[in-house]
Image (cartoon, rainbow, N blue to C red):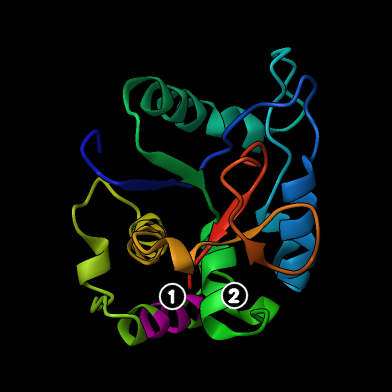
Amino acid sequence: VLQSDVVVVDAPIGRPAQTGFRSCDSAARQWLGPLRNAVFAPPGASGVIINPFSRGILPAIESTECILKTRSGLTVESHPDLVFTALMGKTFPLAAQKRTICGMFCRLELLHKNGIRLTLPDSCRPASVVSVDFIDAAAMAIVGRDWLDPKNRKVLSDGAEPNDFDETKRECIMALPA
């Protein structure tokens, strides 16, 4: 991670003062349509936690903050459901949520079309990693690969349409694949 040109994390970068949706979270929820609940409000810097999902993401936020302090390369935030929605070109139906067999197979097919060849048994190893987390990590790898070329850097920030990445506006963005 320390030597990578681009690191893509599935965790909020930058915590709001209070727990609540950031502009990029709201844009992501709008973009995801029926799967909007996959994006939840990150815990605020105040430490007040209003839902169990926010509590569960704290270790990932702390790891991300450590990455940001120890490396000089580009580190960006993304969300697996945004990546898969972008790769599919449309929103996923509720029947294809990531923890369903249909959702896993849809995501594995999208990974395959983008150069990552996994099977369902592959995605279940190692045993300590939940298969959907393994699939999500592969989605982040696609964004990282695409972002190696600065011309491929698309983001969702404060609107419902993707924009080109602006190096000067990094507060609240969600990186997308090319």
Badge 2 crowding class, 10 Å Cα cut-off, few under 14, some 14 to 19, many 20 or more, is many
x and y percent of residue 46 in the render? 73, 12
Q: Which type of secondary structure does the marked residue at label 2 adopt?
A: helix
Q: For residue 35, what is the image quadrant?
A: bottom right
Residue toward you, 94 or 157: 157
Residue at x 37% of width, y 79% of height: 108
Q: For residue 70, what is the image quadrant?
A: top left
**Residue indicated by mark 2:** 85
Q: For residue 111, what is the image quadrant?
A: bottom left
Residue at x 35% of width, y 30% of height: 72
Upstream in the sequence, badge 2 or badge 1?
2
Up/down of 49 relative to 139, above or below: above
x and y percent of residue 156 in the render? 67, 59
Q: Is residue 106 left or right of residue 120?
A: right
x and y percent of residue 164 in the render? 61, 63
> What amino acid is at disc 2?
Thr
Q: Is residue 151 left or right of residue 137?
A: right
Residue at x 71% of width, y 53% of height: 157
**Residue indicated by mark 1:** 104
Residue toward you, 114 or 48: 114
> What amino acid is at disc 1?
Met
Up/down of 157 relative to 112, above or below: above
Q: Which circle marks residue 161 in the picture?
A: none
Q: Is residue 160 left or right of residue 154?
A: right
Span colored in magenta:
103-110
Q: Is residue 75 left or right of residue 42?
A: left
Magenta region includes residue 23: no
* Main secondary structure along the magenta-highlighted residues: helix
Residue at x 76% of width, y 72% of height: 34
